[in-house]
Image (tube, grey):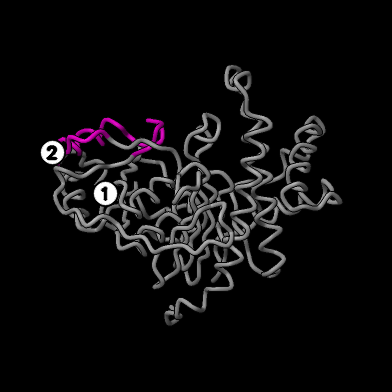
Amino acid sequence: MSARRPSSHWLAPQQAAIDAVRAACRVCRAVQKNLVSTDTLAKKDRSPVTVADFASQAVICEMLGRVFPDDVIVGEEQADALRQDNQQALRASVTEHVAAGLGNSTIDEAQVLNWIDRGGTSSADGQSYWTVDPIDGTKGFLRGGQYVVALALLVDRQVVLGVLGCPNLPCNGSSGSLMVAIQDGGTTQLPLDGEHCQGSLVHVSNMNDSTTSRFCESVESGHSSHDDAARIAEHLDITTEPLRMDSQAKYAAVARGDAQIYLRLPTSSEYRENIWDHAAGCIVVTEAGGRVSDTRGQDLEFAYGRRLEANRGIVATNGLLHQQVLDAIASTSPHHG
């Protein structure tokens, strides 16, 4: 592994990442405003989040490509489905929102599809690459809850930079927040809309008494076992109601002290997490002074392609409570250990 670089080494990638995530968040908000309605929710129509997913990834890949044309980007989406003959309307909508988000009306569908594929077809096996989740928390996006645009840079299989764009997580009077973490440089919170605002360093809670702590978990029980989490909370004598929110906004909540514990307990023994679901959130918490591991206490290993093949589940805490949480998992839910 190469020697650690000073945090100043990542300032250029950091600014490029902030700009790209901000632009992608604007696109997501525009899609939400224009396409999400009571009618689409009643019909369980997921097309708005599909448009936002594709458009967000296209914007991020295009903007990073301007600054770092040779960098690999590993994203969640591929454009194959958009290329199908019966997806003309969807393609047009994605292209329209990308063009508006980039302020360039001359953008065509072929360019947008290629930008999407830059992320969707890349391999996560090089020495250096970006990983992006264009919308983390699709149901939160549709219901007007928490969702995140997540972007991280990995070098030598280590996350060195992470940005979480949280459009619905308030920050200093702004409706949204931006969490930015650099290796050995701390975690900074900025208003999402304040492009000229200076951020402030955040730090995890200093609470070391589990009985007064608060944990956060996924809204959807299909993503994380709520029953196991409830048993763990009981073992730790936690009486505060869990903070349930979608997406990597849970990492942001731990990083800035809104909660002390984030549990993502696998619902099956075969399931493995995607790297883009945790890379940015992981460094946001650790650089804020917390700790992130799997349910066995092992560090997250970004060395196996697009999934965390060596890890089971996620435990993120303020650090002071980490071992207590791991012990509770081993005592109450041994199949997660």
User: Callout 2, which amino acid?
Assistant: Asp
Which x, y percent locates residue 220? 41, 31
Q: 39 or 139: which is nearer to us?
A: 39
Which x, y percent locates residue 282? 40, 57
Q: Are marks 1 and 2 in contact (CB under 8 Å)?
A: no
Q: Earlier in the sequence, mark 1 or mark 2?
A: 2
Tell me if residue 282 comes above or below residue 155 in the rendering: above
User: Callout 1, which amino acid?
Assistant: Gln
Please, which residue is most extreme toward the front here?
Answer: 173
Q: 255 or 247: which is nearer to us?
A: 255
Question: Which residue is painted at 67% across and 30% down in the image?
Answer: 35
Q: Which range of residues does the magenta coloring cover? A: 217-241
Magenta region includes residue 111: no
Disc 2 secondary structure class:
loop
Disc 1 secondary structure class:
loop
Q: Which residue is mark 1?
A: 260
Which x, y percent locates residue 51? 68, 37
Q: Alpha carbon of mark 1 to alpha carbon of mark 2: how far?
A: 14 Å
**On the rendered structure, is 171 left or right of 126?**
left
Label disc, if present, on residue 135 of the rendered structure: none
Q: Give the quadrant of residue 211.
A: top left
The number of discs equals 2
Q: 149 or 322: which is nearer to us?
A: 149
**On the rendered structure, is 333 left or right of 255?**
left
Screen quadrant of the N terminus = bottom left
Label disc, if present, on residue 237 of the rendered structure: 2
Question: Which residue is painted at 86% across and 51% down in the image?
Answer: 106
On the question of residue 268 being in view, the answer is: no
Question: Which residue is painted at 80% across and 37% down in the image?
Answer: 92
Magenta region includes residue 221: yes
Q: Give the quadrant of residue 232.
A: top left
